[in-house]
Amino acid sequence: MGRSNGPLIGMLAAVLAVVAFSVGGAMVVDQLEDDPDPDELVADVVDDHGGIETLQATERSEHELHHVDDDEPTVVATDARIELRPPDQRRTEVVSKTGSADVPDVTVVNGSTRSHYIADDERVIVDDDSDWEAIQYSPETFLESTETEYVGTDTVDGRETHVVEVHAVENATDDGGLGLLVGDTEYVLGSANDVDAANATTTVTWWIDVEATYPIKEQVVTEYDEPRQHALERERMVRTVTYEDVRFDEPIPDDRFTFDPPAGVDVVEPIDSADVSTIDEANDAVPFSVSEPTLPDGYELVIVTASEFDGDATVQFLYRDGDSLEDDEILGRITERPPVYDPEDVDRDGVGDVDGAFVSTPMGTTLVWHCGDVRYELTPDVDDGGEELALEVAESMGCPA
């Protein structure tokens, strides 16, 4: 079920991992003689959005991704204009983006309807069944799942703030972890057991506006104890979201929370993913037949997905010979979607029993063949013999009846 952009801090049950960015240098804060209770500060945000009616601001979102073998982190950033009316109305208009930031140009949330406008694709993705909600956890549940620490006061864009750190509690009793929405990204801050299982620790820092009692800055830092075991071999992620030129409780016209697509723009529904874990289950989830490939000894299925977008179904799978990301592997894709390569990318055609073609794609050299309107793709990532492996696997799959 889809979700959307939300306030700087919102409580959501989510399953995506946070993408983050690092802020260099130590945080300098002042101490008050009588520190406020951090639990009460956080509970006020979670329970009542600090009591605000609206928020308008420039949202600056910066990410830093540290990978094991990279000398420098990958940095992406976006600036956006936001208009927020809790609990379930928000408009985000991206003004600028740097690095590889891939975000919609406009996102509008209005109750259960969420719209993403991607100008370059001339497409609007509309989800009429979004369960986006600014608050889905009571303060009691939140505080049972986390522990808070008051750090002090700090100034953000000329506004005085209380700085509070939030950590997952060891032996917490929550089942699904604590869902947070940071700017445009959803993630789960689970109990300590969940975090340890992922070989990661996460710390959330909130800068809560003293007057509005609402966060106007947030930093999320995730450290991986065993980065080689992370799917992307990532060792550290930090993301900071800051609201500047903030205006609280000024009226926002109702039509700001609706989106009328420009003329000539396609309107489509979001990707609908099925819950599958085997090739047989993927076969049952799509309208075309999917046969299980035969691979050399040692290869095992790592992941398989089945989804539908804009009326077209897709199955993807990955087999790997070993437990390390550096081991040989082959990625498969069976889809009704249009190809992402051009005719000039074809290196050689008429190959193998499937009468396929080797094509240069962003993933590497890919073997492509067609069974009616369905396209098959196999992309090997091996030390050597990749084309031979792809042809062998393709022969085992063929064109299922």
Image (tube, helix red, strand yellow):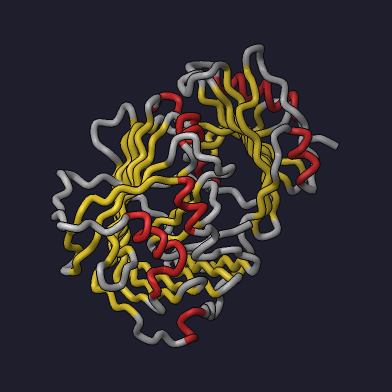
Given residues 171 and 386, the one toward you in this image is 171
Q: Quadrant of residue 173?
A: top right
- Residue 20: in sight, yes or no? no
Q: Position of residue 260 (x, y in %)?
A: 53, 80
Q: Quadrant of residue 64?
A: top left
From the viewer's perspective, is residue 109 above or below residue 364?
Answer: below
From the viewer's perspective, is residue 207 above or below residue 95?
Answer: above
Q: Position of residue 286 (x, y in %)?
A: 76, 46
Which residue in the rendered view is the most extreme toward the right? 401
Given residues 352 and 339, the one toward you in this image is 339
Which residue in the rendered view is the most extreme toward the top? 297
**211 left or right of 201 in image:** left
How many callouts does the rendering have? 0
- Residue 320: in sight, yes or no? yes
The residue located at (34%, 76%) in the rendering is 56
The residue located at (86%, 37%) in the rendering is 401
**349 left or right of 146 in image:** right
Given residues 299 and 167, the one toward you in this image is 167
Q: Position of residue 247 (x, y in %)?
A: 29, 78
The residue located at (69%, 34%) in the rendering is 277
**149 left or right of 180 in image:** left
The residue located at (17%, 62%) in the rendering is 155
Which residue in the rendered view is the most extreme toward the front? 34
Q: Position of residue 240 (x, y in %)?
A: 30, 53
Q: Quadrant of the N terminus?
A: bottom right
Q: Quadrant of residue 283?
A: top right
From the viewer's perspective, is residue 199 above or below residue 137?
Answer: above
